[in-house]
Image: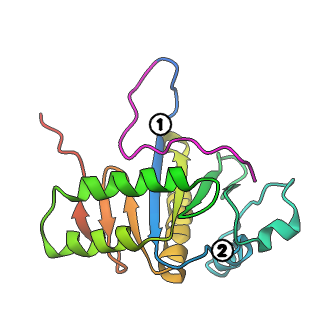
Amino acid sequence: MGKELPILPASAQPATAEQAETFIYSRVFCQKENSPPLRLLIDFLKARGQTPIVPSNIDDAALDEWAWVQVALGYARDRKPIHLFCVRDRGSYKDVFDQEKAQFLDLLTAYDDIESQLVTEYVTRCRFILTTRFVEKDMTDDGYDFNGWILEFYQDQCNGIVQIDNQGFYSPKGELIVDMSVAVED
């Protein structure tokens, strides 16, 4: 578990010669006060037929810690892991939490339907944000499934709502309820 957190973009990153990898970010805005320990997530993934690959240098006791900040979980040995970040409304990364929350509340002001009002309430009341990040070109269908199980765990266990960059916010049933996709004109 590391101490550094990057600024987490809510839109596609510009293509530059220096940036060979494009990341996809997804989030769960969670209303529960504390994030469950990683061991519960790992057990949940195993119960769903997944085989999470935990970093070899992680202390076993750290898996039972609720105040974790970041971890990389693999889904296949020949693929890059999915990075998980957890920022809270208190503590060392409160500034990142506040920035993420404010950014999405601002984006949601462009919508005025019932669904967006519901999403705005979730974002307003969230206590922590679970973010996943993965390399788009390295992801397989199994990886997308693995990421989906992670999002579902936090949505269900932490009274959360899922957001995926360049898509939008999803209901607990998996339906897109606030479409934030970027329209591409021909």
Q: CA distance from mark 1 to mark 2?
A: 26 Å
Kindly identify which residue carries mark 1.
22
Above or below: residue 122 compared with residue 84: below
* Residue at 35%, 51% in the rendered image: 103
Q: Is residue 56 visible?
A: yes
Q: Which mark is residue 140?
A: none
What segment is highlighted magenta in the picture?
1-16
Against 43, residue 58 (above or below) is above
Q: Amino acid at mark 1?
A: Thr
Please tell me whether mark 2 sits on a helix, a strand or a loop.
Answer: helix
Residue toward you, 41 or 186: 41
Count of marks placed on residues: 2
Image quadrant holding the N terminus, namely bottom right
Q: Main secondary structure of the magenta part?
A: loop
- The structure residue drawn at horizontal position 12% and vertical position 33%, both measured from the top left corner, is 186
Look at mark 2 in the image and give the residue it sits on: 41
Judging depth in this view, the residue of 24 and 117 nearest the camera is: 117
Quadrant housing residue 50? bottom right
The stretch drawn in magenta includes residue 11: yes
Q: Residues within 10 Å of mark 2 (few under 14, many from 20)?
A: some
The picture quadrant where one finds residue 169 is bottom left
**Residue 146 image-quadrant placement:** bottom right
